[in-house]
Amino acid sequence: MYQPLETDKENLFTKYLRILAVVAAYWVISILTVFVNKALLSGLDLDAPLFVTWFQVLTSSSICFVMSALSRRYPKVFSVPDGNPLSKEVIRKVLPLSLLFTAMIATNNLCLKYVGVAFYYVGRSLTTVFNVVLTYLLLAQKTSGKAVLCCLLIVVGFWIGVDQESLTESFSLIGTIFGVLGSLSLSLYSIYTKRTLQFVNQEVWLLSYYNNVYSAIIFIPLMLINGELQVVMDYEHLAEPWFWGVMTIGGICGFAIGYVTALQIKVTSPLTHNISGTAKACAQTVLATTWFSEVKSILWWTSNIVVLVGSALYTRVKQLEMDQRHREHINSQKV
């Protein structure tokens, strides 16, 4: 019988340690990003959420541009795919997705501006439900009855959460609406991302680069229409270094969360990423209620648990269905 060598154990330990480090980094950066964005959107006394979001995508675009330039100059040190966002073919293929990307991050930040961090997860919890509905409407792909029941559980949790949050002073109807729109735009973005990735040879980093560049341009007319240019120009702290310092931190967090999300999926799996994200959301909610000294009702906490359980069960059901299809495919090849 083969006995594991000491080097095998060390390699396995190193692998698990790397996975643990990546998951921990995802948790820390994801939670930190939510709290930083909440502070930027609600704590600066600057009523310009689109400007804040624009600066974040501009920062991400700048980081991507610098990394791309360094990769061309020092290919042995920096290895990132090369691409030109100014190419007509790239613009034609990617711009429609970038419009969805812009809508997604704009509604996401607008939701966070108006609702508390504790309610943020429930307010944005309908993404899975929209995924099922839009997959059927746009791709004509049916979902199993078990998965649909999980979605109904999520809807029930969302409904209870909104009902309980409406009894508090922190409730915001417009914030809740932006949360629903954010879930819808994220679902659309996820569906069309699969198609657009084929054009960039499945390079997630390159697609992120293009999306951030185009989004930075798209946000300019949106800010002008929303009257935010004058609001920003009149801001009393506009010339102070600390303001641009915190804005830059927000931009770096925005870039970092995209990177660690892709990295977590790479070193684990999409299923593990979903489980990690669900658990992280639970920890984020508990942390937010503690940090802001918020007292919530039993039904409010119940809504969070129902949403979390529904999301976890949906992930499990989809995993079992994928395993079943894989076994059927293997058995069909043996025949």
Image: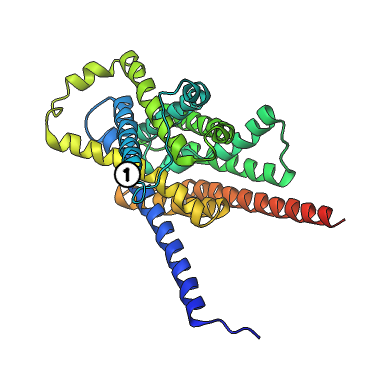
In this rendering, does residue 293 appear at all? yes
Name the residue nearer the viewer: 148 or 172: 148
Give residue 269's position: percent from left, percent from top: 55, 54
In the rendered view, would you say 224 is above or below 24?
A: above
Quadrant occupied by the N terminus: bottom right
- Is 225 on the left or on the right of 4, as rendered? left
Q: Is residue 151 left or right of residue 261?
A: right
Q: Residue at x 22, y 30 (%)?
A: 45
Quarter of the figure with residue 43: top left
Q: Amino acid at mark 1?
A: Phe
Identify residue for label 1: 35
| Quarter of image, res 330 | bottom right
Q: Residue at x 19, y 39 (%)?
A: 245
Frontmost residue, 309 versus 49? 49
* Residue found at x 36% / y 32%: 114
- Residue 188 appears in which quarter of the rendering? top right
Left or right: where 140 falls relative to 300: right
